[in-house]
Image: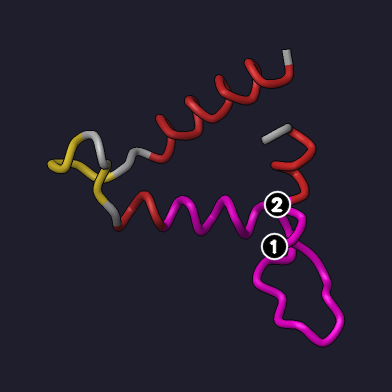
């Protein structure tokens, strides 16, 4: 999947859609839900602990930097 395709996938979730339910109105809404997800679900690599959002965010920034380099 290209970076443009990734962006289009998220675009489908964000913003005003006439006659359709709006799930998210801005990127911050998605990020907040990911934070809640990290609070409630266990890390698949370590079933003893839940996801650490700050660590996941750091990893995401590394992925982003590699993908846009």
In this picture, is 59 found above or below 47? above
Magenta region, residue range? 9-36
Asked if residue 18 is among those painted magenta in the image, a careful observer would answer: yes
The residue beneath circle 2 is: 9
Q: Residue furthest bottom?
A: 19
Q: Quarter of the image containing the C terminus?
A: top right
Q: To which quarter of the image does residue 47 belong?
A: top left
Q: Quarter of the image containing the N terminus?
A: top right
Q: Position of residue 3 (x, y in %)?
A: 73, 33
Q: To which quarter of the image does residue 29 belong?
A: bottom right
The residue beneath circle 1 is: 13
Q: Position of residue 52 (x, y in %)?
A: 34, 38
Q: Nearer the viewer, residue 17 or 32?
A: 17
Q: Secondary structure at mark 2?
A: helix
In this picture, is 46 found above or below 31? above
In this picture, is 20 found above or below 54? below
Look at 13% across and 41% down and name the residue there.
48
Local crowd size for mark 2, using a 10 Å CA cut-off: few (<14), some (14–19), many (≥20): few
Look at 77% across and 49% down and name the residue there.
8
Q: To which quarter of the image does residue 7 belong?
A: top right
Q: How far apart, in angstroms, are the residues tagged by discs 1 and 2?
A: 7 Å
């Amino acid at each position: 999947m290209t970076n443009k395709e990734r962006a289009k996938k998220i675009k489908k979730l964000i913003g005003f859609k006439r006659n359709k339910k709006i799930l998210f109105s801005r990127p911050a809404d998605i990020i907040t839900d990911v934070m809640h997800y990290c609070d409630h679900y266990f890390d698949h690599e370590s079933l003893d602990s839940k996801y650490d959002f700050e660590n996941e965010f750091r990893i995401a920034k590394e992925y982003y930097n590699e993908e846009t380099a």
